[in-house]
Each structure stands twice: as structure tokens, then as C-alpha cells.
Amino acid sequence: MAVLNTCSLNPLNGLKLEAFTPLSKFTTLRVGGAAQWLAEPKDIEEIKLLISWAKTHQIPCHVIGAGSNLLISDSGLQGLSICMKRLNGAKLNPKSGLVEAFSGEPIPNLARSVAKAGLHGLEWAIGIPGTVGGAAVMNAGAQGGCTADWLQSVQVISLTGGLPFEISKNDLNFSYRHSLLQDEKLIVLSARFQLEPGHSHKEISHTTQENLIHRTSTQPFNLPSCGSVFRNPESLKAGHLIEKLGLKGYRIGGAEISRIHANFIVNTGNATAKDIYELISFVQTRVKENHGFLLHPEVIPFGFD
């Protein structure tokens, strides 16, 4: 990795940049090499400053939320990695059901907050280990619900610079675990949801808690993972397909197909990103050989050739 002269950091006006920071602590899989540069902006102005700095130095930008859907290479990432977790917080209106949340707000926190306000719509999101921004990008979903059901718009900014702008739900091209945001060089700054007001906060909170109990009892929350690894093929469940092939517990290095849920790959303690990447490829090969189609990963690889 090239090292920029420290004097080039002066235009950031005191915003902290960390050099060669291990990204393993920024992903739920707990793997990944170092970021050439890492920043954790706390507001939109700092994000604009970072984008401008990266553009000036002609280095790429990578965006990290909770790191729950990322597989970062053992060789790390060149350029600037922007972690959005400090851009958090939310405002909600219990009467109208309008909710505005910053990109780095953990989606389980938001689910709890709106439940306490008696707002129906995000009960399904309680166990998803991601952020509001990540949920919008991936159209995250569970328990029969998904982000697209309730999201109205997102505020974004281009990684090439410029001013923030809004994209409405109708222009986000939502489909199963997909949105326009996966195809464009944009950073989600915030999201607006229209939830359903007027419900009993006790009932909504109870449903939310029941969903959490179900997820924690059927998924491996005791070991690092990225959540569901593969998208479900139409009318089928990826986990069932993998389990029927007898692959629960199959390991490559420190990466293992969960013995609890076959659509999870867990880090047993010493996995590398290479182990996980190879295990994903192995599962894809076995399913293709036995069923004739390719499983598509939900997890996004960064830094691999």
C-alpha cells in the first residue's frame, strides 16, 4: 500500500484518520486485513470532507456500516475506508409514524425504539446485525418483512463528490435483497420510513421480542458470522439445500458451516477471510453439482480479485 505524506492530512481540519487499521474489528465475521486509511465521521460535513480528500489524492473510498454483510480480504483495502457507525440517531413521530434515521443507526435499536412508540412496521428487523444504511442498500429482511415495505426515501451523497440528494423509494429499484444502491457509487446518509401509528406499544414490543427469541434460538449468535450467507432461490431455502447435502459442520480452516443453521458460516476462532471465501465457493459448487443452479451470496466481498 502506498503511504501518503502526513502533511496531506492537514485539510481534514482535525478529523482523525487512522493508518493501517485492522478491519477485522469492524466486521461481524472478525476477519479482514488492514485499511490503508480509516475514518469514522460523525456528521455529514465530515463525510463531505473525506470524499473531497480522497478525490484530491485519487484514492478509492469504501463504505462500512456495521460490517455485518462484508467479507474483507486478508490483504485489506487500499484507499480510504469510511465507517458510518458514528453517524447515528433517529427522530420519530408517534402520531404520524414518520421516522428519520441516520445511516449508522443500528437497525435493531431502531426496531426497539419504534416498538416502544407503538409504531408497526419494523418488528422483523430486531435480530438483523446491521445499520439503517446497510438495510437500505441490501433491502434487508426477515420474518416476512423487508426494508422496501416501509422505507420512503434515502438521502445520499456521491463518492465522487457533490451535494447530498434524495432518492425516493420508487427510484430505488427494490427487489429481493437488492436495490439501486448496490450498483451506484453512493453513500447513504439517512433514511425515511413511514410506519403505521396507533398500535399498542406493549403488543408491538411483545411481537418484536418474540421475533428476537425466534432468531436467537434458530441461528448461531454465539460465534462471529455475517448473517445469512446466500440469498434464497425462488420458492426454496438456501439453508435447507445446504443441510440436505450433509454440509452442516463442514470446515475449511477456521470457517465452518453452522451446525445450527446451514445458511450461516461461522468463524470458530481462527478463520481467515480466505477460509470463508473458499467455503462459500465450495458450497456454491456442491449445490450447482446437485441442483443445477448457483447460489448467490448476500455477503459482499471486498478486496478480492
Image (tube, grey):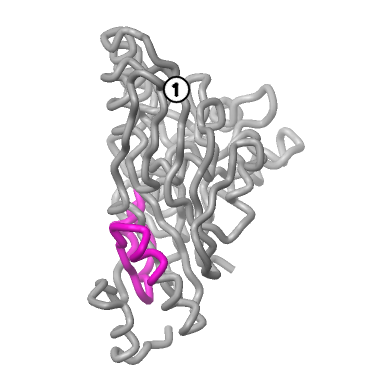
Residue 126 falls left or right of residue 165: left
Q: Residue at x 37, y 59 (%)?
A: 44
Badge 1 amino acid: Leu
Q: Which residues are magenta?
A: 23-49
The foreground one among 104 and 118 is 118
Quadrant placement of the N terminus:
bottom left
Estimate the x, y position of residue 21 in percent, counting from the top left: 29, 70
Q: Which residue is mark 1?
A: 195
Q: Is residue 196 magenta?
A: no
Callout count: 1
Looking at the picture, how far across and down is residue 304, in whole percent? 54, 66
Residue in the picture at 53% in, 45% down: 137
Query: Could you tell whether 264 is left or right of 115 in the image?
Result: right
The one nearer the camera, 38 or 54, is: 54
Please give the name of the residue rendered at 53% of the width and 53% of the height, measured from the top-left corner: 165
- Find out whether residue 27 is within the magenta segment: yes
Residue at 37 percent across and 40 percent down: it is: 101
Instruction: Please state, as top left, top right, bottom left or bottom right, where the C terminus lies in the image.
Output: bottom right
